[in-house]
Image (cartoon, rainbow, N blue to C red):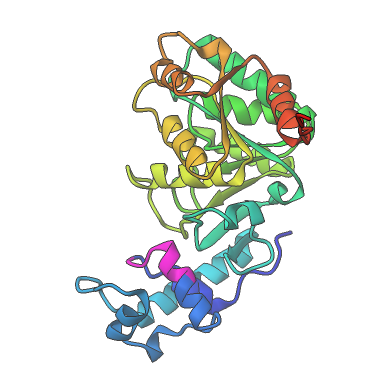
């Protein structure tokens, strides 16, 4: 069962679409989580966030009604909502530069229990790419890691399936509202993930449709959850490259699967390698790299 949902006032703040996640965190912090839009004006909000909200509609009652419906929906469907300020919120994500204000969770959040690895790639992979994603996800899962991906067709789906085969929960970050699954063809995969102790996560409240903007935004959360990101196959322009870019911005490692390098779907992956990403053949290469980074280096002194 999910933990208790965050305080209702935060659900109201989460429903104000013209505010960025950073602005919501700022408002919540200043007002100690007790924000009631009926007690404020647009002008007052502008003074707090430091920008004009000229075209933003001011509809306090509509936001309150939506938050009330959200709360009822969460209780009925076993969904947890946790804000940046709540205990359930993953610390590794909180430290990122563009952390989401609210996370909606279907299932159990396994990321809190240990290290996570993002495995991403193209929606239209080769057979070799699919096999590699499935295999490495299974290896990582068997070693106790949580595999995180985006539940998209292709590499993402193979990574989630491989992780479940390895015996550990897996987590998918959605590019739509927490009440949906995209693509719909992956509903069975999503249900299996939840049944095996994993979860679906979104920063978008119920009713939010997927769009060309929501998917790139969710990629920052995939990278933010994880110690490292592994790109299997990615052509130029792939969303996987956006995930890798977010990982690098946060100082996280990016790896590229050797099996997918130099192929017809790997121009973007090859570019990452040319820029310094390490090629790996399996999870053992990633774990070895982590061990090297964690081993204190002896200082050498010249007498």
Q: Can residue 183 be seen in this view?
A: no
Quarter of the N terminus within the rendering: bottom right
Left or right: 109, with 36 as reference point: right
At which x and y percent is residue 286? 68, 25
At which x and y percent is residue 34? 53, 84
Left or right: 261, with 74 as reference point: left
Residue 139, quarter of the rendered image: top right
User: From the viewer's perspective, is residue 160 above or below residue 16?
Assistant: above
Report the label total: 0
Q: Does the magenta stretch include residue 121?
A: no
Please identify the dominant SS of the magenta region. Answer: helix
User: From the viewer's perspective, is residue 94 above or below residue 63?
Assistant: above
At which x and y percent is residue 74? 59, 64
> Is 270 in front, or is 171?
270
Residue 254, quarter of the rendered image: top right
Residue at image coords 61%, 16%: 132
User: From the viewer's perspective, is residue 270 above or below residue 14?
Assistant: above
Residue at image coords 52%, 74%: 10
Left or right: 91, with 187 as reference point: right
Q: Tell which residue pokes out farthest to the front in this image.
A: 303
User: From the viewer's perspective, is residue 40 above or below residue 90?
Assistant: below
Residue at image coords 32%, 82%: 47
At which x and y percent is residue 200? 59, 47
> Is 258 in front, or is 264?
258
Quarter of the C terminus within the rendering: top right
Q: Give the range drawn in magenta.
A: 18-25
> Is 67 in front, or is 256?
256
């Amino acid at each position: 069962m999910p933990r208790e949902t965050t305080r209702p006032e935060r659900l109201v703040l989460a429903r104000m679409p013209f505010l960025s996640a950073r602005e919501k965190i700022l408002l919540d912090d200043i007002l100690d989580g007790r924000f009631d839009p009926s007690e404020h004006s647009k002008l007052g909000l502008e003074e707090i966030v430091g920008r004009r909200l000229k075209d933003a509609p001011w509809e306090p009652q509509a936001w309150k009604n939506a938050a009330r419906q959200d709360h009822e929906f969460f209780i009925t469907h076993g969904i947890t909502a946790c804000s940046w300020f709540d205990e359930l919120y993953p610390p590794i994500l909180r430290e990122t530069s563009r952390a989401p204000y609210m996370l909606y969770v279907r299932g159990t959040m396994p990321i809190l229990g240990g290290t996570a690895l993002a495995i991403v790639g193209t929606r239209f992979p080769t057979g070799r790419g699919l096999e590699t994603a499935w295999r490495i996800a299974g290896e990582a899962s068997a070693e106790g890691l949580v595999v995180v991906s985006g539940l998209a067709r292709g590499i993402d789906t193979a990574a989630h399936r491989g992780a479940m085969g390895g015996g550990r929960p897996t987590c998918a970050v959605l590019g739509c509202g927490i009440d949906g699954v995209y693509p719909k063809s992956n509903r069975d995969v999503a249900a299996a993930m939840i049944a095996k102790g994993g979860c679906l996560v979104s920063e978008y409240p119920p009713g939010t449709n997927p769009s060309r903007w929501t998917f790139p935004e969710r990629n920052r959360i995939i990278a933010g959850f994880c110690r490292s990101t592994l790109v299997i196959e990615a052509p130029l322009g792939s969303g996987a490259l956006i995930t890798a870019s977010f990982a690098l911005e946060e100082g996280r490692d990016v790896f590229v699967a050797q099996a997918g390098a130099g192929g017809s779907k790997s121009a973007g992956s090859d570019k990452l390698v040319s820029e310094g990403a390490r090629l790996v053949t399996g999870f053992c290469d990633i774990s070895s790299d982590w061990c090297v980074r964690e081993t204190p280096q002896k200082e050498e002194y010249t007498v």
